[in-house]
Amino acid sequence: MIQLARALAISRKDVESYYGKPPLVTWGLLFPAVLILAVYIKDRAGYLDVAPGIIAMTLLFGNTSMAAIVITFEKRSGTFERLLLSPLGMGTIILGKALSAAAYGIATSIVLAVGLKACMGLPMARPDVFIAGLLIGSCVFSLLGLIASVMVKEVFEAMTLMNFFRFPLLFLSGVFVPFAQMPGWLKPVAWLSPLTHAGEMIRFGIFGETAFASPWVPVAASLIMFAAVCVLSGLSFQRYARR
Amino acid sequence: MRQNESETQVAVRVAGLSKAYGDLRALDGVSFEVPMRRVFAYLGPNGAGKTTTINILCGLLERDGGEVSILGRDVAADPVLVKSRIGVVTENSNLYPELHCRRNLEYTGELYGLSADRRRSRAESLLNDFGLMDKAGAPFGTLSRGMKRRLTIAAALMHEPEILFLDEPTTGLDVPSARSLRDLIRRIVGGGATVFLTTHNLFEAEELADEIVVLIGGRIVERGKVSDIKRRIGGARCLTVSFSQSVSGGDVLGVCPAIRNAELQDGALKFEASDLHDAIAQLVAFCNKENIRMNDIGIREPSLEDAFVSLLAGAGKSDGKDRP
C-alpha cells in the first residue's frame, strides 16, 4: 500500500507536469478527430468501420509516445535519477509512470468517443468492453513506451525506435482494414499485434460484434500481452538501473 | 559484517570495494569508514572513482566485489530501507523545473512516504531555513543557480536523512552562494546528520571536513584528519620575508641551514622552513650581522591543496601500471 501511494504520487505529478497541459490534450484529441472527420466527409456511413481502429491507434501513438518522451526527457534532465535514488521499488516507478500515460490515453479516447457519439451518432453496444479495451490497451502501450525509453538516450531515438514497429502495426492490426477482411496469410501476423486485440475489444464495445470467435479471445490475448510487457518492462528497468 | 552500526557510531563502512568497467578498474579494494555526525570528504581527481563509489553507496550501481554497509544495512540487499534513511544531492541540481519550489519539496516528501501534514510543515520549515520562502511559489526552473542548489539540498533533507551525500555541492556557484552553502552544510551536521562530501574544491574540504580520504586511480592513497594530512604530506611551512635592503636568496641560504628553496616573489623572499623556530632565529642573526632589518614576515601553513598536489605527483610516478 505504501508503494502504491508513492506510485500514485508519481502519476499525479506527471499529469500535473506533462499530461494535463492544454496543448497536449488538444493534440491528443485533434489528431484522431480530424482523421475520423476526413473519412466521414468522404463516406458518411463508412467512417464507422474505421472509428474503432482509429481510437485504438490514438491509444497506441498517444501512450507509447508520451511514456517514452516523459522518461527520456527526465533521464536527460536528471530528474529520473531522483526516482532511482528514492525509496521506491522498481515496480513502483514503472506503475507510476505507466499509470499517468495510460490515464492520458484513456481520457483522450473517452472524450473522443463521447464526441463521436454526440456529433456523429457513434453506437456503443457494450461500454464495459469498450472501457476494458481502453484500459488493457493503454496499459500495454504505455509499458511498451517505457521499455523503449530505457533503451535510448534521446527523444528522437525513442520515436525512431517506436515508429519502426508502430507504422507497420497500423497496416497489420485491423486499423484501416478490419481483421475479418484481412487476407488469410496476414491474420497470424495480426494475431501477434497488441493493437489488433485492443482494436477488436473497442470494436466489440462499439458494435457488439467481433471478428474472433468470442469477445473473450482479444481480452485473453491482451491480458497475456500485458503480462509479457510487465515482465519485459521490469527486466528493462532493472537493467537500466544497474547499468 | 556487523549489524546495528548506527549504535556503534559508524554511518558508512566500505570494505574491499571493487568495480570495473570492462578492462578499466574504477575501484580497486577501497575500504573506509565514516563516523556518525561528521563531515567526511572524499577527494580525488577526475576519473578517480568518486562518483562510482557514491553511485554504489546510494544503490544506483552494482559493485563487483567488497562489502558496503550504510547504517548497518547493505544497500544492495535492502535498497528501499537504506534509501529511506539517506539523502543524495547529485552534482546537478535536478529538481523538476516546471514545478514550483514548495511543490518540489512536497512531491519529494510524497516519494519518501511523509504524511500530508508532515510534508507541508517540512517544506515550510526548509524554505524558511534555506532563505527561499519568497520563492516558494516560483517554478524551480526560474531560480538562480545558487537558489537551485539550495532547494536541491533542501529537497534531500525533506525526510530528515541520517546521512547526506553531497556531490560537488558548490560547483558553479559564486563566492557568496558557495559561502552560504558551506554554512548550511555546517548547520546540517550540527543538526545531527552525517555528510559525505565529494568535491574538487580543496578549500571547501579543508573548511568543512573532519576527515578526508583521497582516492587516485580507484585506490585510496591517503586518509585521516585534514590537519594530519597537511602536516604529513603538505611539506614545509613557507616564510615570506621582506628586508630593508636588497638581499639575494643565496646570501640567506648560505648562513641559515633551517631554510631552503629561496625564491623572490613580489619583492619579498619566499623560503621553506624545515624548522620554524630555527629558521626565524637564523634569519634574525643574519639580519643583525648584516645590519639589515626585516620589514615584514609572513608564515603560511601547507594547505590541503599542497598535500593533494604532492599526492597526485607521487601517484603519477608510481601509478599507471594497473590502469589500462
Image: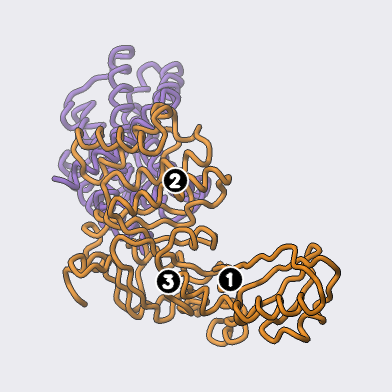
Q: CA distance from mark 2 to mark 1?
A: 37 Å
The secondary element bearing badge 2 is classed as loop
Q: Secondary structure at mark 3?
A: strand
Mark 2 or mark 3: whose residue is earlier in sequence: 2
Residue B101 horizontal side relative to residue A76, left or right: left
| Residue type, numbered disc 2 | Asn
Disc tally is 3
Cα separation, mark 2 vs mark 3, equals 32 Å
Q: Is residue B272 above or below residue A107?
A: below
Percent position of residue B112, x then y? 24, 46
Colour assigned to chain B in the rendering is: orange
What residue do we see at 49% from left, 75% from top? B229
- Going by the numbered disc 1, the residue's amino acid type is Pro
Which sits earlier in the primary sequence, circle 2 or circle 1? Answer: 2
Q: Which image quarter is the C terminus of chain B in?
A: bottom right
**Nearer the camera: disc 2 or disc 1:** 1
Colour seen for chain A? purple
Where residue B32 appears, as percent x and y from the top left, is 36, 75
* Disc number lying in front (2 or 3): 3
Say if mark 1 contacts mark 3, CB within 8 Å. no
Residue at (75% x, 63% y) in the render: B295
Labels 1 and 3: the sequence-earlier one: 3
Query: Which residue was labeled with disc 2?
Result: B94
Neighbourhood count class around disc 2 (C-alpha, 10 Å): few under 14, some 14–19, many 20 upward: many
| Residue B62 makes an appearance in the image | yes
Q: Chain of mark 3?
A: B
| Labelled disc at residue B302 | 1
Q: Is residue A226 above or below residue A180?
A: below
Is residue A89 something that shows in the picture? no
